Image (cartoon, rainbow, N blue to C red):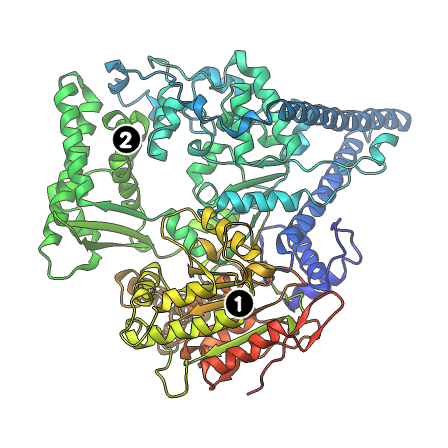
């Protein structure tokens, strides 16, 4: 365990603080929780970068530490309120001060008790509702078939007239922008959308500080939220009222955690005519359109005076029940109130707010949801991919075929409504057409280029049709406020176009634009925007929040985050912690294997060699031997979906000398399941689990083999614990293509920005700064590969009693750089020793039998049933 030295004495000074952990915490968990607590307590923009291996209870430790701190902080806030009241009464007689303080104390206690009673009643009511509808809630899709009405009135497609001065552009922007006046009034009455008056609401203390937990954006984000909620329900936390203020009943009363999961309209909308639209932006535009005064149709679920009682019930139920996103959706349907807007009413009372990356990283999204970071803490779990997440949020793609389709639809719209367009609308629709024509002209020229891909000069891109003379900020604002993209079409083509225009407004130093010719007929080309630096996008979060925690199982090396997320942050503001594992070293066997046999081809699955058919055949034989020895579940991770498909196709071909193909021989040992790009992983996981557990209808005895991809759906957020993952195999090292335009640009940017920073900040010579810049770029490239490998390996070993073997199939894992990248995933037992990565030069068959035999017939077995592997020495 490695802790920042400056924090060691501070965490030791916390003493035996009770974190309300539901189990007896391990030493690493105790240290982890103290570090989280101290970072949050320090505040003032403190950043914690914390690493705790998968299977060490990291999420539960985060929950216990952050909520313990939050309850203690709120308790202190109550006392501070009384102290401030005492100061304001200092000129009054002592007896009067005592009376006034007693009344103030009683008022604070009454507000707390009233709120808790209200939430308890909501819990009881929700439990009764759940019981009534438990059977019929499984199939409610039929209700969605009832159309809320399709409005064919031409008026809804017309652009609203405006003089450009007093329209929406000049309206104040806040969390309630885009809502009708009636909806704004209802939310403002509930304390949202305007500054809260000091004496307006007894729940004002609840709005003072919150924990914002960020969920990674993956296809299994709902699964991760469900896992988080399961962990959140384990601990029990005391009341936030100070004991001195508590009544006799409150002293013995625990206080339920108040969680609010936030999401987009796409996930929460219950209006069938809106939710069926194909893109997020189309849903957003249609929702806003239905709230306009001139709209011919109104949404039946939007907040208004008649639904105020339902909005209050939604708020109380959401805060009382620890819901997930689907629960909020169902709650809104049962109460006939919009869950997207009603959830905002619950924000002031929430203690934990969960949300995916895009809703945190974009200020416009935070404002739309009414999220304030000031004074609150932000915790990013599974933060190993935070830099990729920032880049993905700000990425944009645009195809020539999409521009052609958009131009056609814009032409149809102008022919239909052109004579009715006036003033600002006529001018701006013309500007949109001009930008479409200009970008199309440039993209047509790239089709004749000799290169299939390359970097685009922004000046060259915006020169055709003089679109560089158009104010893109004003045009984007007009398209958003007029809902032009929604009015012109129901497909996401023009919304994609607008997203690309937004990317064009970013600073040229922050990103690059690339072109890529696409295969197919007719010829097509795609423009892509890549954000090279996550620094500026993340800096607003760090500068606003009280504290930020980045936590994950594979965060090392920490320098990547320091250099690329917080390069300008003072070292004293950053706390780092790297914890060891909780399992003994005998529970993990790691092997790096370079060949199937001593005289055969070596395993080197580099981009240049991975197509070698003999090597692919040897890989199949190696997997056949491992599947013959290792029981239960075997999970194999390949570098990419394309290569996985290539290998499977080769294994299915029967060679002339063989009675069976490698694929058929594997199937005779284990049931085989394969991850498919773009498909749901739930069904595959279910069938894989059933095959291992030997449920009826599955192949008896042999277990199952799961073929997956590093960085795919199976490599994050999935637990292959116990029998589901007795062996994890990583084929090759998933290095990105360093020759691709995007990675070349990224490496050049890191090198140049590091050089400039070292010369300006540290006064280093140009030559030395250039050398260190090259090394920083190279380290970043290698670390991106190693983190992906570590995440995949971390799917096994999920608890203290778990055990598994890991095989790294690539001779490059012998190199020092690869070992430095992989070593921190290997067990650090209680004694501090690490399980050695063996550089085995034996045949793969012999080596696998060594540790495979250990799995089947262990050298020793503890009373708890933990296997002790017999590890072969070099």
Task: Tell me if 540 is positioned left or right of 873 in this view.
Answer: left
Q: Residue furthest left?
A: 448
Counting every numbered tag in the picture gives: 2
For mark 1, give the secondary structure: strand
Name the residue nearer the viewer: 711 or 145: 145
Is 677 drawn above or below residue 867 in the view shown?
above
User: Label 2 crowding class (10 Å Cα cut-off): few <14, some 14-19, many 20+?
Assistant: some
- Percent coordinates x, y for residue 700 in the rendering: 53, 58
Q: Residue furthest front?
A: 659
Report the residue at 75% width, 53% height from top. 23
- Percent coordinates x, y for residue 592 in the rendering: 48, 78
Q: Nearer the viewer, mark 2 or mark 1?
A: 1
Name the residue nearer the viewer: 242 or 662: 662
Residue 727 shows which numbered tag?
1
The Cα–Cα distance between marks 2 and 1, rounded to whole angstroms, is 53 Å
Report the residue at 50% width, 26% height from top. 341
Residue 479 shows which numbered tag?
2
- Percent coordinates x, y for residue 236 in the rendering: 74, 42
């Amino acid at each position: 365990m490695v802790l920042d030295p400056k924090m060691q004495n501070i965490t030791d000074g916390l003493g035996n603080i009770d974190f309300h952990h539901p189990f007896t915490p391990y030493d690493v968990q105790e240290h982890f929780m103290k570090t989280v607590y101290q970072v949050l307590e320090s505040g003032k923009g403190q950043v914690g970068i914390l690493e705790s291996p998968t299977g060490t209870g990291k999420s539960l430790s985060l929950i216990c530490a952050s909520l313990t701190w939050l309850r203690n902080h709120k308790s202190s806030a109550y006392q501070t309120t009384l102290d401030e009241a005492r100061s304001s009464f200092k000129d009054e007689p002592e007896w009067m001060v005592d009376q006034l303080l007693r009344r103030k104390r009683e008022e604070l206690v009454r507000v707390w008790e009233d709120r808790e009673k209200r939430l308890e009643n909501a819990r009881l009511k929700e439990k009764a509702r759940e019981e009534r509808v438990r059977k019929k809630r499984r199939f409610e899709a039929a209700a969605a078939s009832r159309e809320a009405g399709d409005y064919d009135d031409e008026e809804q497609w017309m652009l609203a007239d405006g003089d450009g001065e007093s329209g929406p552009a000049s309206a104040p922007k806040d969390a309630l922008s885009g809502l009708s006046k009636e909806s704004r009034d209802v939310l403002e009455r509930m304390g949202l959308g305007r500054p809260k008056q000091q004496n307006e609401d007894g729940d004002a203390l609840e709005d003072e500080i919150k924990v914002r937990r960020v969920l990674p954006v993956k296809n299994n984000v709902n699964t991760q939220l469900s896992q988080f909620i399961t962990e959140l329900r384990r601990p029990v936390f005391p009341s936030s009222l100070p004991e001195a203020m508590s009544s006799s009943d409150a002293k013995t009363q625990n206080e339920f955690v108040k969680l609010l999961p936030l999401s987009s309209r796409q996930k929460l909308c219950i209006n069938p005519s809106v939710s069926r639209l194909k893109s997020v932006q189309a849903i957003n535009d249609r929702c806003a359109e239905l709230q306009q005064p001139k709209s011919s149709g109104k949404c039946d679920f939007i907040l208004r005076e008649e639904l105020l009682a339902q909005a209050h019930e939604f708020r109380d139920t959401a805060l009382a029940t620890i819901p997930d996103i689907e629960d909020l959706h169902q709650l809104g349907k049962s109460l006939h109130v919009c869950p997207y807007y009603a959830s905002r009413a619950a924000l002031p009372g929430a203690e934990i707010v969960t949300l995916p990356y895009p809703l945190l990283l974009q200020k416009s999204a935070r404002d739309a949801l009414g999220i304030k970071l000031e004074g609150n803490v932000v915790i990013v779990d599974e933060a190993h991919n935070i830099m990729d997440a920032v880049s993905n949020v700000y990425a944009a793609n645009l195809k020539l075929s999409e521009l052609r389709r958009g131009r056609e639809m814009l032409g149809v719209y102008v022919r239909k409504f052109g004579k009715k367009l006036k003033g600002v609308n006529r001018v701006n629709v013309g500007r949109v057409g001009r930008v479409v024509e200009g970008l199309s002209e440039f993209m047509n020229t790239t089709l004749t280029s000799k290169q299939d891909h390359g970097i685009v000069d922004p000046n060259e891109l915006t020169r055709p049709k003089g679109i560089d003379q158009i104010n893109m900020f004003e045009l984007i604002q007009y398209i958003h406020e007029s809902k032009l993209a929604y009015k012109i079409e129901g497909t996401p083509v023009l919304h994609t176009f607008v997203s690309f225009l937004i990317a064009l407004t970013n600073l040229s130093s922050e990103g690059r634009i690339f072109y890529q010719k696409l295969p197919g007929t007719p010829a097509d080309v795609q423009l892509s925007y890549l954000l090279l630096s996550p620094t500026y996008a993340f800096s607003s979060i760090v500068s606003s929040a009280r504290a930020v925690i980045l936590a994950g199982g594979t965060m090392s090396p920490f320098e990547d985050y320091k250099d690329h997320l917080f390069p300008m942050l003072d070292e004293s503001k950053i706390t780092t912690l790297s914890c060891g594992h909780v399992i003994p070293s005998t529970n993990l066997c790691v092997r790096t294997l370079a060949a199937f046999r001593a005289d055969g081809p070596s395993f080197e699955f580099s981009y240049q060699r991975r197509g070698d058919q003999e090597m692919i055949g040897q890989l199949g034989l190696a997997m056949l031997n491992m599947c013959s020895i290792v029981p239960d579940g075997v999970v194999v991770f390949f570098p990419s979906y394309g290569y996985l498909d290539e290998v499977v196709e080769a294994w299915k071909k029967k060679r002339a000398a063989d009675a069976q193909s490698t694929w058929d021989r594997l199937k005779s040992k284990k049931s085989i399941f394969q991850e498919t790009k773009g498909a749901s992983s739930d069904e595959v996981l279910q069938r894989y689990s059933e095959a291992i557990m030997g449920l009826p209808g599955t192949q008896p005895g042999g277990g199952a083999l799961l073929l997956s991809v590093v960085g795919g759906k199976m490599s994050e957020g999935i637990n292959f614990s116990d029998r589901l993952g007795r062996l994890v195999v990583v084929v090759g090292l998933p290095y990105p293509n360093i020759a691709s335009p995007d990675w070349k640009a990224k490496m050049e940017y890191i090198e140049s920005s590091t050089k400039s920073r070292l010369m300006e900040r540290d006064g280093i010579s140009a030559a030395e700064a250039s050398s260190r810049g090259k090394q920083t770029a190279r380290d970043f490239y290698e670390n991106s590969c190693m983190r992906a490998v570590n995440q995949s390996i971390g799917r096994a070993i999920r608890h203290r009693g778990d055990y598994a073997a890991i095989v790294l199939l690539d001779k490059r894992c012998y190199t020092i750089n690869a070992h430095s990248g992989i070593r921190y995933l290997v067990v650090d037992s209680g004694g501090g020793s690490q399980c050695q990565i063996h550089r085995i030069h034996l045949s793969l068959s012999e080596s696998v039998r060594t540790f495979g035999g250990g799995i089947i017939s262990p050298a020793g077995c503890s009373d708890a049933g933990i296997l002790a592997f017999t590890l072969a020495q070099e």
